[in-house]
Image (cartoon, rainbow, N blue to C red):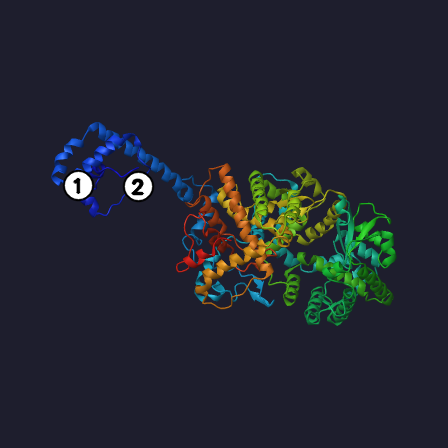
Amino acid sequence: MTETPIELELSVKPSQSESGRGLQPPPLFQLPLTDQDPSDNDQQTQLQLERQLSESNPEAQQQAKPRWINPRRLLLLLLGFSLCSAILGLFYYMHYRHLNSNIQTVTPCLSPACRWASARLSISVDPFTQPCDYFLFSCGSDILSPNKGGRQRGQDIPGHPQNLKENAGRKGQRKEKIPDRRTVLLQYLREILGKSNDRPVSSAVQKAKGFYHSCLDTESIETAGADPFLALIQKLGGWAVSGQWNRTDFNSTLSLLMRDYATFPFFNLYVGRDPNEMPRGTTKRYIQIDQPDLLIPVQWNSKTLKSQAETQTLRPFLESCQRYLALLGAPPSRSMIHVGTFISLSSELAVAAAPLHVRLSRGQLHRRMTIAELQKQAPAIDWLGCLRAAFHPLPLFKDDHVLLHNLPYITQMSRTIGKWLTKHELSTSSPVHTYMVLNLLHTLIPALDSRFLETANNLSVALGEAEGVADRWKRCVFETERGFDHVLTHLLSERTALREAEEIVQNIFSSFKSTLHELKWTDQKSLQFVMKKVESLIPRLWTTKEISSEAELDLLFSKVTVGKKSFFSNYVQLLSFWRKRRSQLLTGPAEAADGSLSVTPFFLGDELLFPMGMFIPPLFHPTYPRAMNYGLMGFLIAKDILHLILPDVYSRSEMVHTVGECVWAHYLAVTKEAGGGGGEFSLSAAQQQEVWVQYSALQIALQAYHRSLKNHPRDTSISGLSHTRLFLTSFSQVHCDSDEYSQFMPLEPSFLITVICVNSDLCPTSLQCPNKTQQQHSLGTC
């Protein structure tokens, strides 16, 4: 529109009182106006002449005033002004809605889950009101320093809270962040197992809950003490430690331990496919025989290329063995002799054991041979009898093939056992039998009283393998899952919104594939290689295929009886039940193990499976706004997928290094003044990878949410927040995961919001700290 006529200016001029109050027109009316319709040129010319006359002659202005007040003309001017105002209002509304979608009127989510989330958000640090502080809370994990020594996260990192004493008082706000996924799942399963049945449930579910409650009944467990295990020893023919041993046959006792008690003292057994056959699409599975998990601590000697007992750990190991024998009532005069022979036999068996990377480099994995050939290589073991016991009632024959993973150990183990059996053939001490009984004790320690658990934990602490005794309820959830994982998976499936979970998985996977195309690859073949692998994957939720109803669960656990006051008996039953599971793995359809406690996706053939345990509150809920589900679970899904394909991307794209260093530069720029300088260093390759993974995961999840919002524009809000702001605020609640990669994240994950918001119109408000705006802005986007 051209310059507004002076008559109109006079007609809308504010009064003196309004001007004195400092009232200004709203910003809408300060926007540039569109041109006026040119059809009224004659009127414009006349008005311009009248303006010139009035400006040159004030008296004429007063006289001319009545001349232009024409009702028809005034009406047209007012209508034109109103039309322009309406158009400008509509334009501003659309523009304002695009940039500030988070403050528009939306439907609030009032479900119980949303009310809980709102309460949590209200007491948590808001990244948009405290942009300089919210990312400075460390997750506390260990990472590797530039000199490869152990160090705490944030040590020597400028601005990191471990170097900022003034941040010590803020630790309370850290607690409001959502715990890691494994802890969340354990708490969720605890609630399910501990809840009384408010409706009829299957017998399998009742047994799982009964097993869990018997595990929690510490009073009964403490009262029983060591008696249940001592009774079991007598059932096996006694042992020389107590002076009462029926001289049972070695192979008969070994077969019994493998069949009924899931105990493998001299070698490990599991089921799996032959990787040499997998390229041909073969799905046949074989019995796999590997070296055992030795009780004695051993270390690999790179000079002698042999394993040996760790000298510094022999004393605590010796003390733990003596403590066990004392708890079992062994006379002190005899215990030292039996402990000495146990350690001696363990040390001889350890000599031929080797770490996985050594066995892999030597080509010792997946060596195929028949059971008859194995019998010739290691004659001390009755292989056919032991394997038939472990996989009863499956028929096994001498011509059946097995896969060996360390044949030198198996042959050395056979010679060692043969020597010890011959040496003590006429003796009443029987070190080999005592060795098997102590291995059985190790299997059954979770079902015994607290004295045994404390002894085992003290040894773990001395070896640097544990930090303390876990809460009893956590131990009971773990033990229940080991025996009733099918039941827990079924219960999780019942409580999971499958349609919503499937939708977010598919949307994240689609955005993930788009991101791969946007990366800079070393060449076109690299992109094609990775995309071929990705396109062949079928992402889906993982449920137990062969157990699809409660009736089938009841049948599976029909022979398991659970007593309310005998956790030891319940535990022993499940050890026997595992044999049935091993047999099913050998002949039935492929399935993943420990599914109900899985919190990350995994490959199974050409499928990318997402466990039910991922999609639980507070990380995911069907009544949450989609912004919250994508900000929490969407990010975690994207991060998990990127971890799975990282090896292929890292070797074929330079973006991992570039983006990792870019994000790190942002962090240093923001925290330099706060940290007082000092200690800057470049990220290691592992740290660059983790920064790239988490930054890319946030971008993928945000892109997937915007696509979802485009297809389904309506979304609810929490605490007045919606869309992008709620997405990012929800993401800031994600705690560092307890996965194997978290130790390499050198900064708080929520800091990635700051990098996302630089030079971007995605964020509803500025996310820049005072005195750092220009420096951070100059870094640009990553």
Q: Residue furthest top?
A: 72
Q: Looking at the image, which residue is at 86% across and 48% down?
A: 399
Q: Looking at the image, which residue is at 60% across and 63% down?
A: 467
**Amino acid residing under circle 2:** Phe
What percent of the width, then of the height, locates residue 3?
27, 39
Distance between the alpha carbons at the discs numbered 1 and 2 = 27 Å
What percent of the width, then of the height, locates residue 308?
74, 68
Decide if residue 684 is in sight here.
yes
Which element is circle 2 on?
helix
What percent of the width, then of the height, locates residue 267?
77, 58
Which element is circle 1 on?
helix
In the rendered view, tell whether residue 432 sits above or below residue 528: below
Number of disc labels: 2
In the rendered view, tell whether residue 762 sits above or below residue 443: above
102 or 516: nearer the viewer = 516
655 or 432: nearer the viewer = 655
Q: Looking at the image, which residue is at 70% across and 50% down?
A: 574
Comes first in the chain, label 1 or label 2: 2
Determine whether, in the image, residue 402 is placed left or right of residue 769: right
Residue 493 falls in which quadrant of the image? top right
Q: Which residue is mark 2?
A: 29
Which disc, if any, is residue 717? none
Determine whether, in the image, residue 407 is placed left or right of residue 332: right
What percent of the width, then of the height, locates residue 254?
80, 56
Location of the N terminus (image quadrant): top left
Q: Which residue is mark 1?
A: 55
Tell me the crowding category of disc 1: few under 14, some 14 to 19, or many 20 or more residues within 10 angstroms, Cα based. few
461 or 777: nearer the viewer = 777
Determine whether, in the image, residue 701 is placed left or right of residue 385: left
**Amino acid residing under circle 1:** Glu
In the rendered view, tell whether residue 456 sits above or below residue 765: below
